[in-house]
Image: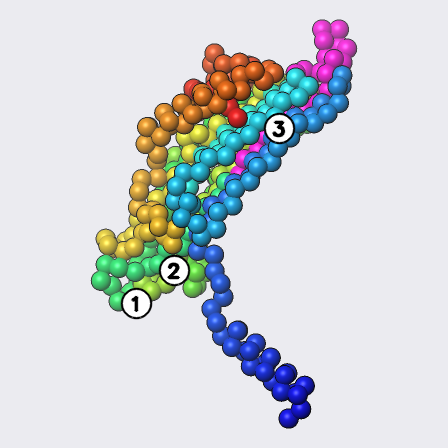
Amino acid sequence: MSAARALTAGLGAALLWALSLPAAALDSQLTAQLLVNTTAFYPVSGVDSDAPTLNLMDDPRVSQLQVLDTRSAFGGGSALAHFEGRMGLLRAYAWASFPYCCDALGQRVVQGYSNATVEGRFYDSIAVSGAGLAPGTPVSYTVNFSIAGSLSDPSFESGGFLTAYGLAEVRLRDLSSFAEVNKSWDASRDTPGLFSLTLDTFVGRTIALSGMLAVGASVSDAARLGRVAWADFGHSAGYQLLPSVAGLNTTGASGYDFSASPVPEPGAWALLAAGLLLLGLRRQSGPCLRPPSSKSADSSAPPTASGGTARR
């Protein structure tokens, strides 16, 4: 056999061996993407923007609450975005404001817009095992999905000059059969509440649970219905996993036990409010922001889910 043929045969054998190995899999992940942007064209021209991200893959910190926030301000406009999340829990808040274009005589005095968006996601895999059941035994898991939040009113103006949105999602999938149950939630059409979905599977398999929460707010100088838009989901999207047989595993590869209640305790909300208040006091010198008197579209500063002040 020539050296070339021997090399080819060796590479072929190595390739077959590599293909026989299980593919590397992502067992757990927590991500967040934030964007704030305040742009002015007149009487000054410029942009203040920021887009921080979070991406934890197969990292023990995914079971611990992670916080990410940012803010922009320019030309009289402001925007802020805030995220908190871990396995089984996502919270998000977006706020934007920009002055009206024209004075009482209809003369243009400012031109520009502000917007803020937040998207958080988690993914975890759970081995279907325990309760003394043999592999192949049929079982099921129910995911309880709890969502609470609100949008400024109005949440949309014709032409898109003022918008606010809130979207959420839950997916539970059998990684062997790829059967899944899922639900998409939209604050513009759906009411907050608790939703339950059940997936049939078998002992010995692995299931995957994932969740998503996305919020956004945008205001331009042309908006006539309001100067402020916000999407307040500081009360969160929560995810709980319950098996059909007591003792079946509900702990993911991340180490988080999804049998915990999907609704965060009131103490967590109070802690969030306190943190936002401190951040707001720290950044109070920024333009167009002062503590709000109420949670309304006419507030000149961003209220929060628990009544705290804005932050960065």
Indicate the position of residue 70 as horizontal and vertical percent values: 55, 30
- Where does the image place residue 279, in percent across and percent down from the top left? 48, 23
Q: Residue furthest bottom?
A: 1
Question: Residue at (33%, 51%) from the top-left corner?
Answer: 251
Identity of the amino acid at label 3? Asn
Earlier sequence position, callout 2 versus callout 3: 3
Evaluate whether residue 110 shows in this view.
yes
Looking at the rendering, the stretch of residues picked out in magenta corresponds to 99-119
Rendered position, 298 above or below 241: above
- Mark 2 or 1 closer to N-term? 1
Report the Cα–Cα distance between label 2 and label 3: 40 Å
Location of residue 262 with respect to 297 vertically, above or below? below
Can residue 170 be seen in the rendering of this structure?
no
Residue 42: percent from left, percent from top: 76, 19
- Callout 3 environment at 10 Å: few (<14), some (14 to 19), or many (20+)? many
Identify the residue under disc 1: 135
Q: Tag 2: residue type?
A: Thr
Residue receiving disc 3? 115
Q: What residue is shown with label 2?
A: 206
Colouring scheme applied when the structure was drawn:
rainbow
Q: Secondary structure at mark 1?
A: loop
Percent of width and height locating residue 37: 64, 29
**Does the magenta segment cover residue 132?**
no
Residue at (77, 10) in percent of width and height: 107
Give the distance between the C-alpha atoms of the residues marked 2 and 1, in whole angstroms.
Answer: 12 Å
Task: Give the SS element for disc 3.
Answer: strand
